[in-house]
Image (cartoon, rainbow, N blue to C red):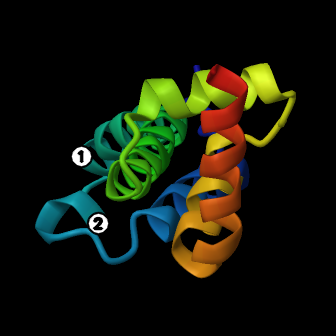
Amino acid sequence: MVRITIGAPRRQKKLRYFKQAKGFRGGRSKLWRTVRETLLRAWAYSTRDRRTKKRQFRRLWITRVNAAARLRGMSYSAFVDGLKKAGIDLDRKQLSELAIHDPGAFDKLVEEARSARK
């Protein structure tokens, strides 16, 4: 019986994998089994870390807003509570950008939050 190899499709698949593994160190970019294992792990990590990145950015924005609010004599939780009571609907990213790039507008938001809590 004749042994049939997959031929061109197998070579094309391997080529795709090797191109993706370009730049990896040692056998991770040169040995087929190692390349395949490395890429499977890398794809799993990239999927996981796309979600983790969103979490980390939200934490960063909250930290920035907290620091800016405390400089103005208010805690983060009191500030956010005041904004909700005042009906101001800004997300953490926008609040963080305001705190960094437009301190005057952030001061007005703090005053609005303070007056809405009273």
User: Which quadrant holds residue 97?
Assistant: bottom right
Residue appearing at x 43%, y 34% in the figure = 76
Position of 39 with respect to 103 (left or right) is left
Label 2 crowd bin: few (<14), some (14–19), many (20+), radius 10 Å: many
Position of 74 with respect to 92 (left or right) is left
Would residue 72 be visible to someone looking at this image? yes
Q: Is residue 32 above or below residue 52?
A: below
Label 1 crowd bin: few (<14), some (14–19), many (20+), radius 10 Å: some
Residue appearing at x 40%, y 64% in the figure = 21
- The secondary element bearing badge 2 is classed as helix
Q: Position of residue 67 (x, y in %)?
A: 33, 53
Q: Position of residue 4 (x, y in %)?
A: 62, 33
114 or 101: nearer the viewer: 114
Q: Position of residue 108 (x, y in %)?
A: 70, 59
Q: Quadrant of the C terminus?
A: top right
Q: Is residue 72 above or below residue 40?
A: below
Q: Position of residue 81 (x, y in %)?
A: 61, 21
Q: Which mark is residue 34?
A: 1
The residue type indicated by label 1 comes to Thr
83 or 60: nearer the viewer: 83
Q: Are marks 1 and 2 in contact (CB under 8 Å)?
A: no
Q: Quadrant of the N terminus?
A: top right
Q: Which residue is mark 2?
A: 29
Whichever of callouts 1 and 2 sits on the residue coming sooner in the sequence is 2
